[in-house]
Amino acid sequence: MAFATCVATAFEQRRPLPVDAMVPDPLFTSTHAIAIDAAPDQVWPWIVQMGAGRAGWYSWDAIDNGGTPSARRVVPELQTVIPGDVMPAVRGATDAFLVAAVDPPRDLVLTVPDGHGGHAVAWEHVLEPIDGGRTRLVVRGRASAHWLDLARAQPPAGHHRIFIERAYAVLAHLPRPLLIGVATFGHRVMEARHLRGIQRRSTASGRHRGSAAGVTDGFTLLTFEPERILVLGWTAPEGGYVMTWAFVLEETEHGSTRLSVRVRVRPGARICGLPWWAANCLVSVIHFVMQRKQLIGIARRAELTMSRSSAFKMADRQAACAR
């Protein structure tokens, strides 16, 4: 029953994904999927923070996370990744997994270099909205024959292999048919647990957000480019958007940032049940006061974070000089 919840449909098994081109001739491939009672923007934070030494993998932690429990909360400082970043497969890893592509809150592709200019492993998480404000999470992994070389290689000096690394080393020495059979079963067990871990966390966080504040609707994420643009929209019952709210960051001279914020409300929209002419005057005044407070708060916190970072760096330099 638990396994059945993670079975991909025939269409999901066959559909092309970007990960396919990264490992065109796989030794092993698998596609799993799960339905989650939460919108993609509620599921995405759990996916983008994955990694050993980060939030974990939400699977069997004793096997793939060195015994460290996976996170049960969204970690704000782990919410931004860009291509080239590392989401460590094991603690201390510097070359796997590499972020090959990221499209919040829809797609994340991770890879392991094969040492020959290609990929030994490619792993993709695709989030698609489905009926009822839910998400279909489709995960596909592909491994090339070069993965065997990496699994058989001796670990760096001083590196203590965790359980899954030792298991991979044993698998890599099995005859090819037996290897594929065992790997298929083992990967299915681990990935089913991984998907259900994401499902459980996303659903719980969605219920908490709604029940704690009595929220049944709100802003929807329309556009997101890390460190550049955030656009939110408030959906109208009849379709379209009553309001859009955009935040744009632009780098200026001397390393400072210019934050521009724009709100647009659809003409004729009834806000708080007021006529349009009354709402326009009242909301303009209230919004100016609230937006000013928000911008000053963002600036103060960003500058405080920057000053603390500079202080830590200065302390480190002083300590180094003392040594």
Image: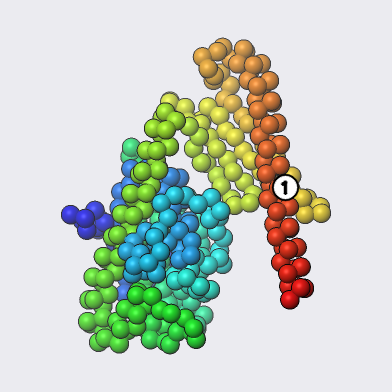
| Vertical arrangement, residue 58 with respect to residue 232, above or below | below
Q: Amino acid at mark 1?
A: Glu
- Residue in the picture at 59% in, 52% down: 226
Q: Residue 141, position in %: x, y?
A: 36, 67
| Camera-side residue of 148 and 265 | 148
Query: In the rendered view, does 70 fall on the left or right side of 223?
Result: left
Q: Residue 190, position in %: x, y?
A: 30, 65
Query: In the rendered view, does 137 fall on the left or right side of 119?
Result: left
| Camera-side residue of 37 and 116 | 37
Q: Residue 292, position in %: x, y?
A: 70, 31
Give the labeled residue for mark 1: 303
| Vertical arrangement, residue 45 with respect to residue 319, above or below | above
Query: In the rendered view, does 118 fall on the left or right side of 192?
Result: right
Find the residue positioned furthest to the right.
254
> Residue 81 is drawn in which quadrant?
bottom right
The quarter of the rendered structure image containing the C terminus is bottom right
Element type at marker 1? Answer: helix
